[in-house]
Each structure stands twice: as structure tokens, then as C-alpha cells.
Image (cartoon, grey):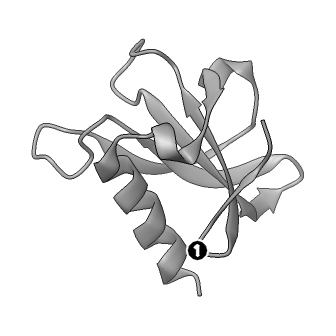
Amino acid sequence: MKTEIVNGKRVKCYDNGGKCCDRYTVAYLDWEMDRGLYQGVGMSGSPFHPQGFGQHCMMKLGRHLGKRIAFKDLPADCQKLVEQDQEDTK
């Protein structure tokens, strides 16, 4: 799967199948902190809900994040969070 572009920024999206509360992870490839260490966000399917989860983090890419998925396959609120993050960096 190719790297995708959201608001002009490169991202990779992952789904761990619900193994933990941060089921979805999106790596922000234009926010590389150190060689191979990226900023991104881990989130539940409802990151804006009071009982949901959405936390920014640093990560190394790999299978431990889950299966690669397309940005369009993220839940709508997850897409919204990523889009908002990418707008903030313009």
C-alpha cells in the first residue's frame, strides 16, 4: 500500500483489529523526530467522545502497529482528527 497524502502531508494508517483501546494508529511521515521515529496519533474509533481515546505519540513503523489500511477506511472521526492535525502544521 502506498503512502497517502492528507492536506498535503504524508501519512500511513494502521488498524490493530481492536487489540487495545488505540485500535487505529496514523503516522505523520513529515514529522520525523529522529531517524525512523515519527510523530502520529493512536486512537479509538471515537477519539472525540468522552469515553473514546486519542493521544499523540512518537512511533517506529512496523507490523506491531497492525495491518496497513487506507485513510478512507478509518472511522469518520479518526479521519477528522488526522485532517485537523495536518491543517495545524500548514
Q: Amino acid at mark 1?
A: Asn
Is residue 20 or residue 10 the one in the foreground? 10
Residue 43's spot in the image, x, y percent?
Answer: 38, 40
As drawn, the residue found furthest toward the front would be 72
Q: Tell me the quadrant of the picture where the C terminus can be found.
A: bottom right
Residue matched to label 1: 7
Near mark 1 (Cα within 10 A), the count class, few <14, some 14-19 or many ≥20, is few
**Position of residue 67 in the picture relative to residue 62 (left or right):** left
Residue 31's spot in the image, x, y percent?
Answer: 71, 65
Is residue 65 or residue 3 the one in the foreground? 3
Residue 47's spot in the image, x, y percent?
Answer: 27, 46
What residue lies at 85% left-to-right and 46% top-to-bottom? 36
What residue lies at 46% left-to-right and 59% top-to-bottom? 82
Q: Is residue 16 above or below residue 82?
A: above
**Position of residue 34 in the picture relative to residue 65 (left or right):** right
**Position of residue 47 in the picture relative to residue 24 (left or right):** left
